[in-house]
Image: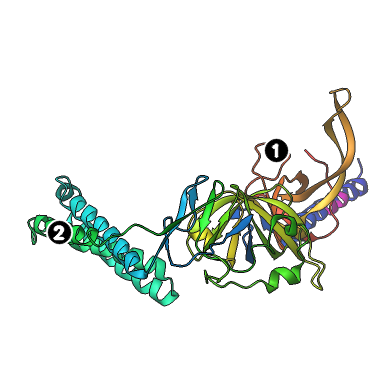
Amino acid sequence: MNTRTAKLLLAILVLFLMLTVINVVVHIFKNDYVTETAVAVSASNAVSFKGVYIRDEQPIEYKGKGVISYAVDDGGRLSAGEIAAYVYNDEKQIRINEKIAEIDAEIAVLNKIQNPGTQEVDQPAYLAGLIENAYKNIIAYKEAGDLEKLRSEKEELVIYLSTMQYVTQEILNFSDKIASLKTERHNLESQQVDPIDAIPVPNSAYFVSYTDGYENILNFSKAETLTASEIKSVTDINGAKKDSGIGKIINGYTWKIAGVIEDPRDYFKDGKKIKLYFPSSGNTIDAVIEKIRPAETDNQNEKIIIINCTDMSYDFVQHRVETIEIQDEEYKGIRIPREAIIVKEMEIEKRNPETDAIEMVKTGVRGVYIKQGEKVTFKLIDEIFQDEDYIVSRVRPESKYVQLYDDTIVSGVSVGGDLE
């Protein structure tokens, strides 16, 4: 090989090495892609709305004269023919009956406090915590105007304070107090008279001691045609009694809630199981979406939702309208930004429903491009939740799906690559 040829080959080799070095440097210092690391996330779809109670309600009328004394708490279940209320000539008998009930409750509490096991279980430090919490709750309920819970919390506080006196031996026993209460009860019993009338329920149902005028308006058949404006116009009278009757019964175990919610992604579907949280009482119950349909308002994202419920208690019959929160299940997976998601034509395995055979079918699949060093790879996503800015993909062990800490390409140059 002559000198000229050797120099030419050397020049070509040097040029090739220089191009290789430049290519490496460019790839190191020039990043054409904007990536986001796939991280673990927990998400839920909570929606707060004004809920309107719809029940199969029947007012109970009483044409006679006298003062009504209720025999069952609101939301209590009565069998057919059971007594919902008694009628007396005047309120004196009602006050006597209420006082006897209070004395019975107080005697029961005192007996419970001086039970031999009380000193062993209720220690002063533990009771001090209960007393402090009771004080805080009383203040909170007073500010919220919740008189029913305020009364209940006050009774709890009395129990805690009396128990503290007993376990710290400030009071050796409540025998004298119990004897005094029994004497008072005996004196009250001597003043009792029989009611002049009794009001039974016609059939097995839940009882409520008030009517609000919506009993014949908000019924199950009306729920199918309620408009958004009708739902928004319903007001709550918070248990105000009407002169038309002594109360009402609620037939059946099922009741409904109607509301107007914003659901821009059509997330909520007929038959979906949900949880409802009631801030006014702190209750959470299971429920099912019976129907969701467009609200036909100027806001295209508004939907009318009808929810089926079966739990019944005092709290659920104290209002016609209240703020309710849908607490959807928590979704745990991998966070994927929406701008990273693309649809790619691919051949995937799919079961033929007619032959039950697995076939390769070409179809569009959703996924993202992943940057792995200098390599770009397409990976599938398994969506279980979506928000405005991102979706949650289920964590799956298969390598063809997005994995935790993958660098998903959000933007950059046109990419390609085959699914591994």
The percent coordinates of residue 325 (x first, y second) are 59, 62
Q: How is the image coloured?
A: rainbow
Queried whether the magenta region covers residue 335, the answer comes back as: no
Q: Which residue is mark 2?
A: 183
The percent coordinates of residue 54 (x first, y second) are 65, 59
Side of 387 where 69 appears, left or right: left
Where does the magenta region start and end? 11-16
Amino acid at the residue labelled 2 = Thr
Q: Residue at x 69, y 64 (%)?
A: 217
Q: Which mark is residue 408?
A: none
Considering the numbered disc 2 on the image, is that residue within a helix, a strand or a loop? helix
| 356, above or below 176, in the image | above
Image quarter of the N terminus: top right
Question: Mark 1 packing: few (<14 Cα in 10 Å), some, or many (20+)?
Answer: few
Amino acid at the residue labelled 1 = Ser
Work out whether mark 2 precedes mark 1 in sequence or the reverse, and give the earlier one.
Answer: 2
The percent coordinates of residue 138 (x first, y second) are 34, 70
The percent coordinates of residue 318 (x first, y second) are 51, 64
Q: Which residue is mark 1?
A: 399
